[in-house]
Image: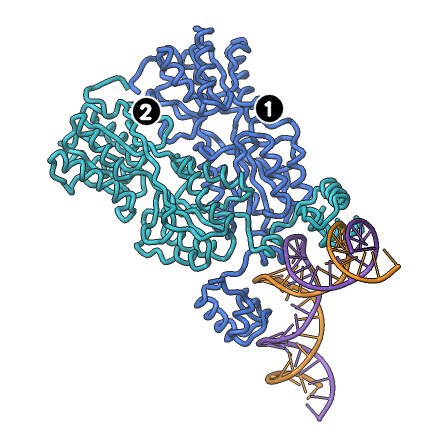
Chain colours: A blue, B cyan, C orange, D purple
Amino acid sequence: MKSVNLKQLAQELSLSVSTVSRALNDRYDISQATKDRVRALANQLDYEPNPYASSLRQNKSKTIGVIIPEVANHFFSLAINGIEEVARSNGYHVLIYLTHEEYQREVSMVRLLASGRVDGVLVSVANNADSDFSHLDLLGERNIPVVFFDRVCEGVAAPKVTTDDYDSGYRATRHLLDQGSRVIAHLTIAESLSISQRRMQGYLAALAASGIAFDPELLLRSQNDKVQDVKAIQDLLAQRPDIDGIFATVESMAMSSYEACRNLGRDIPADVKIISFSNLEIAALLAPALTTITQPAYNIGREAARILFQSIIKNRPLSVAQSQELKSELVIRASTASRSAPG
Amino acid sequence: MKSVNLKQLAQELSLSVSTVSRALNDRYDISQATKDRVRALANQLDYEPNPYASSLRQNKSKTIGVIIPEVANHFFSLAINGIEEVARSNGYHVLIYLTHEEYQREVSMVRLLASGRVDGVLVSVANNADSDFSHLDLLGERNIPVVFFDRVCEGVAAPKVTTDDYDSGYRATRHLLDQGSRVIAHLTIAESLSISQRRMQGYLAALAASGIAFDPELLLRSQNDKVQDVKAIQDLLAQRPDIDGIFATVESMAMSSYEACRNLGRDIPADVKIISFSNLEIAALLAPALTTITQPAYNIGREAARILFQSIIKNRPLSVAQSQELKSELVIRASTASRSAPG
DNA sequence: CAATTTTCCGAAAACGTTTCCGTAACTAAT
DNA sequence: ATTAGTTACGGAAACGTTTTCGGAAAATTG
C-alpha cells in the first residue's frame, strides 16, 4: 500500500489540493468546518506529508546534522543525548556522521551537508584534522549555521560551546601536585586541537606555579589505538621510573594507563597517581576509583543545539559572541589519594 | 551565496538542464566531451545536487532510520558504529531517534518514519513497550523494510538480529553455580522483552539442571532509574541475606549491584558473585573485575544494517528467514571467583 | 546517394508539497 | 442598488531533480 498524498485526500473530499494543504496547516483562510473534515480523513488514512516535497518547496529540511569523531565514548553519547532532546522538542530530525577521527571523512561529510540536506550542523572536529578548515567555511558560504562543541575549530567564525579547559587542566595538575606528585606525565590527543592546547597550558601553568620545570619527555600523544597506547605508556613508565603522576586529557589514555600500570606492577595511587578527563559514570567503581575532571557532556550538547536552533528558527546568522563556556567538575577519588587508601 | 543548481550550470554551459543532469549521472547518451565539460564546471562551482529534489523525484531518500532506547550505553553506541559503517559505505545517511524507553515516543517516531523519510528502519524496541506493536506494522504496510536487533519484537514479521540469549543465560547461571553460588538473584528489565524472557529461561533451565527450585522472590526488575535500582537491590540483599550470586541481564543493574554491595559492605565475590551482560570494555578495570556475557554489539549493528541494505538495494521484501543469531562470549573475571582473588 | 542507424541532446512531464493570485459568494456600508 | 470589504476556496506556478519521449544531426550502410 502506497502512502496517501494530498491529491487523493482532495479528490476524496471534493476539495482542491491547495485547500487541503492549507487546512492541514491550519491557515486562516479555511473554514473550521472544512478543517475538521480534512483532518478527520487525514487521520483516518494515516496521512503523513511527504517530507521531501515539503523540504523542497519550503527550503527547510527540519533536520540537523551532527558530525563527531565517534559515538562509543561517553562524552559524545551524552552530548548526542542532549542534542537529540533539543532537536526532538523542536520537531527536528538528527543525522549522525562519525569521522572515526579521519580528516578526509570529515571533509566529505561536510561537503555532503552543504547541499541543503540540513538546516544546521553541530561539529566536534576530528583530532588528526589538518590546520586546513576550509571545508567548514563552505557551510558558512551556503548560509548553513554551524555550532562547534568541545573540539572546536578556532579559525572558523562560529559559536563554540566548550568547557573551562585551561582551568581544568590547571586544577587537575594542581591536584596531583597537592597530593605529592612531582613528575607528572601529560597524556593527550592531537596537539592541534585547541582543547588539547588549553589543557596543556593549564598543566604548564600549574607546574610553573610550583616551580617545576617542564620536561618534554613527559608528553605522550595517543595513537588512536588501544594496544599501541598501552605499549607507549609502558615504555614511558619504564624509561622514566620517576614518574609519579599521570594527567590524561582523554579518558582512553587513562584506561590505557591503568592497564599499563597493572602490566608493570605499578600501584595506583601509591606509585603513580592518575587523574583524567572522563565522563565514565562508573569511574567510582574502577580499581582504584578514578579521579576525574568530568565535563557536563549532556549540557554541552544541549546548549550547542539550543544556540543552533536560535539561528534556525529566527533565521538569524550566528555570531562568535554566542559562544559559551561551561564548567567542568573535579571529582576526587582514590586514584590520586596521597597515601594508599581503599578503592 | 546560494548553492548552485542544475539550471545555472545549464545556462553557463549553454546546455539543457536534462543534459547536465544526465552528464553528472554518467548516462550513456551523453558524449564524453560534454560530460567532461559539465563535471569541470560542477566541481569548480562546488555543485551538490539538492537531495530533496532527488529524493522526491526518485522516491528514494538515501537515508535509513535507527530507533533505539538510548545512546549512552555501550551496547547501543557500538551497534550504531556498525550501522553507520555499513550505511556510509553504501552512500546512505543515518537518522537517529532515541525513545528513552518510552513507548509513546517510539510510536510517534515510527509514524514519522512511515512517511517516506527513510528507505529502511533498524529498531531495538523500548523496554516498557506495550504488547501492542501495531505501529511497527505501519512500516510494513508502507513497504518500508525493517530489521530488528537485540530488543526484537517477536510479533512482527521482520528479520531479527539477536544473540544466543537462552544459551548465554544458561551459561551465565551455570557459571555462578559452578563457582559455588546457590541462591542466585536475577536482575532484569521488562519481562515483556523477548530477550529478557530468553535469558530468564536459560537461568531457569540451569537452576533446574542443578536441582535448584526457582524462587520468585529473587527476581528484580529495573525501574530505569539508577537511584531506585540501587535501593531496590539493597532491599533485596538485606531481606534475603542468603543471596550469594547475582545474574544481571543488563549492565546498569550490575553497576547498581556493585554500588549496593559496597553500601552494604558485601564483598564481591566472597559474599556475592556477580555476572552480567555487558559491553563495557573496561569491565576488567572494575573493582573487582566484572565477569561478563559480552555481546558482539558492533557486529549486531553491522549485520542488521547489511540485511536491511540487501532489501533496500535489490528492492526485495525482507523475510523472517533472514534473521541471524550471533554468539555472545562469556568472559570470566574476578567478580565470580570461587575464592577471594585479586581484582 | 538514399536509406537506415547511431549519437547526442532538448522539451516537457513528473514527484508532492506550499504559496501566490484570482474570484465567487456573501456581508456590510453608503 | 451599487460599492467596498470579507470569507472561503480553486487554479496554477514553483521548488530542483530525474526521466520519458522525440528529434536533428552525424555516421553508417547498401
Front residue of B212/A90: it is: B212
Residue B149, given in percent of the width and then of the height, sits at: 38, 43
> Which label was assigned to residue B335?
none
Please give the residue where the numbered disc 2 appears in the rendered image.
Answer: B286
Residue B263 placement: quadrant: top left
Residues behind callouts 2 and 1 on a single chain? no
What residue is shown at x 27% (from left), y 43% (from top)? B196
The answer to which image quadrant residue B245 occupies is: top left
Q: Chain of mark 2?
A: B
**Residue B207 locus on image (x, y percent):** 16, 36
Residue C5 place in picture, x, y as percent: 73, 55
Q: Which residue position is annotated with label 1?
A: A192
Residue drawn at x 49%, y 31% is A327
Q: Nearer the viewer, residue C8 or A70?
A: C8
Quarter holding residue B45: top right
Distance (Cα) linking label 2 and label 1:
33 Å
Quarter containing the C terminus of chain B: top left
- Three-letter code, disc 2: Leu
Q: Is A91 placed above or below A146 here?
A: below
Amino acid on which the number 1 mark rests in the picture: Ser
